[in-house]
Image (tube, helix red, strand yellow):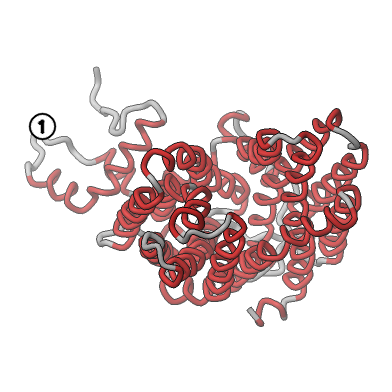
Amino acid sequence: MLRLLRHRDARLYTIGQVCSMFGDSSLWLAMGIWVKTLTGSNAAAGLTFIFFTAPSLLSPVAGLLADRWRRRRLLIATNAATGAAVLLLLAVHDAGQVWLIYLVMALYGIAYAVLGSAQSALLTVMVPSELLPDANAALRTAQASLRLIGPLTGAALFVAVGAHLVAVLDAATFAVPVASLLAMRVREPTPQPMARQWRRELIAGIAHVRRTVQLRQVVIAGAVSTTVFGFGETILYAIAGNGLHRPPAFVGVLVAVQGAGAVVGGLTAATLVRRSGEARLAGGALLVAGIGALLQIPPSLPSVSAGLVLFGMAIPWLVVAVINLTQRLTPNELQGRAYSAVDTLITTPQTISIALGAALITITGYPTLLLAMTAVMMLAAIYLLSPPRQTSAAQTPTTAPSTGDNASDEPQAPLQSDRPPPTPDTICRLRPAPNTPGASPVAPLTANARLGRGCAETAVWSTLRGRPAYPSRSPP
């Protein structure tokens, strides 16, 4: 972490992001409280967060923007525009203007998607590759720390000085990242123009995930695990009330305990990435998260606290591992779309699981949901940690070194052959079928034994794309 802070541009960017994230975390809860105060409706207050999360469906568009514009300029423009949009809240005075709060939260959600893709892409040219884990871990640690104090600060300011001043303060926090970005000296490669149809450009990130074996495996494990991650949003209330027999306000204590674990996880994530690699860290994170969920079942405060700490530690490990692997295995011209693809594939199941958990908890009770979380995360961990895993050092992206005024300050990967290395996908397509005349009956079995997982994943992805997994090469 200290090495990162000695890097001038990384230090400036981190300072700007800390101020921005503090404003964000302070505003979100205050907006829900404001809508509840104006309307008296819990449903109307809940819509605040739905309007914020719904624009995540536009992530592929945000990723394409991050790949077609210079990322630093895009971050400056997006931060400035979002800060101006927040000032629309000054026009809200009664329940008749609640739609303005929803509009601001929707614009916030759109900006969040753009900022995420552009930030991930900019980091790859802003800091040396060996500092990428530190940069990702630092941002995750700051986010986890601010989630402990930001919402409470926003709620306290709302009560003390009113929503309008909270909006002004949040708008002001956007000026800090704008100033930090303007002061940076990062030199970006020239963005490439759109070379294909816009639809193919939009899904290029998903196509990259599909054909990059190690990244595909980690994303599959992450997507499977997040189908139950969202249960935790509802389970905490049940643990506090039904398990520990504490008042609803005790949920705040449980959230703080989990947040403390997340801070520890963020501080240790970079070291663990270097020692074990991203895929093994992701598998270990899912294993620790499964144990943490299991420890929350007994109605005992020490057991629940230990489980929450473990669960909180595992989340930054998983996030940093996935982001760092995406950055490392993706060429510069695809960084934004690859990030948005991974983010969509992993977070969409989590959003669905939040609603599913709220519906199931009244039927099954929270211990059953925790058991389901444990089982799913353990299976995902076994998938990543058990050999053989289809990984290849040849999957490092091939990018030509930039030249001229747009060259990056950091050395680029050496230029490699234009022919991509063989992957389980291409091998699966080319291996002879068992009934091919003259083919050895042993060869297909040997290929299946070596590439069983890779070929199975190819079949899954091909089915989802609506085409045969192994198209015939013989004439009709």
Q: At 61% across and 61% down in the image, what residue appears?
A: 252
Q: Which residue is drawn at 53% across and 75% down?
A: 268
Between 390 and 59, the residue placed more toward the observer is 59
Q: How crowded is mark 1: few (under 14 residues within 10 Å), some or many (20 or more)?
A: few
Q: Is residue 90 above or below residue 471?
A: below
From the viewer's side, name the closer residue of 71 and 313: 313
Coordinates of residue 42 in the picture (x, y in percent) = 67, 37
Task: State left or right for residue 355 relative to residue 102.
Answer: left
The residue indicated by pointer 1 is 435
Q: In which quarter of the image is the N terminus?
A: bottom right
Q: Position of residue 443 (x, y in %)?
A: 12, 46
In the shown orientation, is residue 313 left or right of residue 123? Answer: left
Q: Can residue 55 be seen in this view?
A: no
If the image is split into quadrants, where does the C terminus sit? top left
Instruction: Work out whether residue 224 or residue 395 is closer to the camera in this orientation and state it.
Output: 224
What amino acid is labelled 1 in the image? Asn
Q: Is residue 306 left or right of residue 77?
A: left
Looking at the rendered structure, the secondary structure element under dot 1 is loop
Residue 156 location (% of width, % of height): 80, 59
Q: Is residue 103 visible in the rendered structure shown here?
A: yes
Residue at 69% x, 58% y is 122
Along the horizontal axis of the image, is 94 left or right of 238? right
**Residue 8: x, y in percent?**
77, 75
